[in-house]
Image: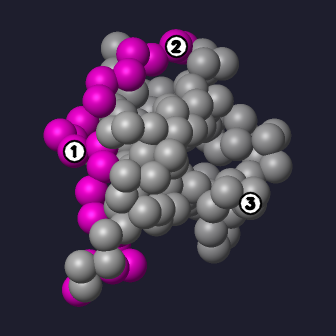
C-alpha cells in the first residue's frame, strides 16, 4: 500500500505537466530499513521512490519543479520549511502530506550551469511502518 501511495503522489505531480516528461526510475530498492530505526533492529521499513523527469529540454527542469510544487499545494500538501527559491535557476521543494505523512521532494540537478539547464527529479518517502504489514503492499 505504501508503494502505491508513493506512486500516486508522484503522478499527482507529473500527470498534468507541460511539457510532459518521461519518468525514469532511479535506485534499486523501493523498500528499506526505516531511517529512524537505523541503529536498531526495529523491524520497521519505509518506501522511497525516485524518478528523473526525462525526455524534455534541460531548460524546463526548473519549471517542472514549480509545476510539481503547484500540483501538491493544490492538494493541500504542506511545505517542509519554506517554498523553493525561485530566483535560483536550480530550486528544490520539500513537502509532506498532512494526513499520512509521506514526504516528497522535487528538485533540479545541474546539467549545464552556463546555459541554465538542469534535470528535474521527484522523490517520495513513506512514513515508517512494520515490515510485513498491510502498508507494505506485499513488497
The residue beneath circle 3 is 98
The residue beneath circle 2 is 20
**Residue shown at the point (45%, 38%) measured from the top left:** 137
Quadrant in the picture for residue 50 = top left
In the figure, 134 relative to 42: above or below? above
- Magenta run includes residue 74: no
**Residue shown at the point (58%, 31%) measured from the top left:** 8
Tell me the mark number nearer the camera, choosing from 2 and 1.
Answer: 1
Q: CA distance from mark 2 to mark 1?
A: 26 Å
- Magenta run includes residue 25: yes
Q: CA distance from mark 1 to mark 3?
A: 25 Å
In the image, residue 127 lies at what x, y percent? Answer: 51, 62
Q: Which of the image's four quarters has the C terminus?
A: top left
**Label 2 neighbour load within 10 Å: few <14, some 14-19, many 20+:** some
Q: CA distance from mark 2 to mark 3?
A: 27 Å
In the figure, 114 relative to 10: above or below? below
Amino acid at each position: 500500500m505504501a508503494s502505491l501511495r508513493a506512486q500516486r503522489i508522484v503522478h499527482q505531480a507529473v500527470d498534468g505537466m507541460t511539457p510532459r516528461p518521461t519518468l525514469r526510475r532511479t535506485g534499486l530498492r523501493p523498500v528499506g530499513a526505516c531511517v529512524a530505526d537505523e541503529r536498531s533492529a526495529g523491524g520497521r521499513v519505509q518506501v522511497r521512490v525516485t524518478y528523473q523527469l526525462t525526455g524534455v529540454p534541460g531548460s524546463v527542469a526548473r519549471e517542472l519543479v514549480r509545476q510539481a510544487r503547484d500540483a501538491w499545494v493544490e492538494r493541500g500538501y504542506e511545505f517542509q520549511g519554506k517554498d523553493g527559491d525561485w530566483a535560483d535557476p536550480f530550486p528544490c521543494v520539500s513537502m509532506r502530506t498532512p494526513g499520512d505523512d509521506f514526504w516528497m521532494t522535487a528538485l533540479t540537478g545541474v546539467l549545464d550551469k552556463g546555459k541554465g539547464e538542469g534535470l528535474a527529479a521527484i522523490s517520495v518517502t513513506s512514513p515508517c511502518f512494520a515490515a510485513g504489514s498491510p502498508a507494505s503492499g506485499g513488497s
